[in-house]
Image (cartoon, grey):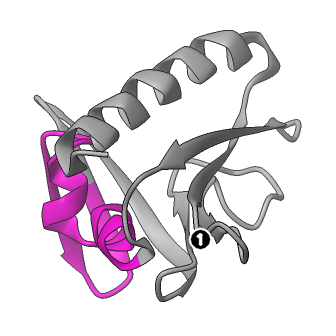
Amino acid sequence: MADKVKIEMEYPVRSSPHMLYNFLSNPSGLAEWFCDDVESRGDRYIFKWGDTEEVAHLVRKRQDTFIQYKWDEDSSSNKFSFEFRIVVDDITLDATLVVTDYVDENDENEMRLLWNSQIHNLLHTIGA
């Protein structure tokens, strides 16, 4: 299988990195904006959308900074399937959420639209 195309999207966030990180890493936080429900056991996360389930594993994380997940079905050579990174400007202390995803080239525009919608839900949920 060919490697996928890397896309990165940046979103300004008016929230503390700690609060934002909880919505990106905890099953209850993820279930509020990313999918219908999330179950986790250790580093294994089961994401549920209606009758559909997708399994991902937590690859790496750093508290309040980033978290990386890899879908079980992802056979690419990429170390992770998608990443949430929180970048804080040293001067203004403004936070930016950087979403990195690896997608099939034909799906790039659709995936950007999907992420924009998902992050809009996140920002609405946290009141940012």
Q: In the image, is residue 42 part of the stretch drawn in magenta?
A: yes
Quarter of image, res 62: bottom right
For label 1, the residue is 93
Note whether 119 is above or below 31 in the view shown. Answer: above
Q: Give the amino acid type for the residue marked by disc 1 in the picture.
A: Leu
In this rendering, would 126 be left or right of 6? left
Residue 119, how many percent across, how many down? Answer: 41, 36
Choose top left, top right, bottom left or bottom right for residue 111: top right
Q: Is residue 58 above or below residue 27?
A: below
Q: Is residue 34 left or right of residue 78?
A: left
Residue 95 x/y as whole percent: 56, 61
Q: Residue at x 88, y 36 (%)?
A: 2
Q: Quadrant of the N terminus?
A: top right
Secondary structure, mark 1, is loop
Of 17 and 55, nearer the camera is 17
Question: Residue 93: x, y in percent?
Answer: 59, 71
Q: Nearer the viewer, residue 16 or 49?
A: 16
Q: Is residue 59 above or below residue 74?
A: below
Picture residue at 46% right of the left edge, 70% below the top? 57
Residue 58 relative to residue 29: left or right: right
| Residue most extreme to the right | 2
| Region rendered in magenta | 18-46
Residue at 22% over, 73% down: 40
Q: Nearer the viewer, residue 109 or 55?
A: 109
- Point out residue 123 in the picture as x, y percentages from the top left corner: 32, 41
Residue drawn at x 36%, y 56% is 55
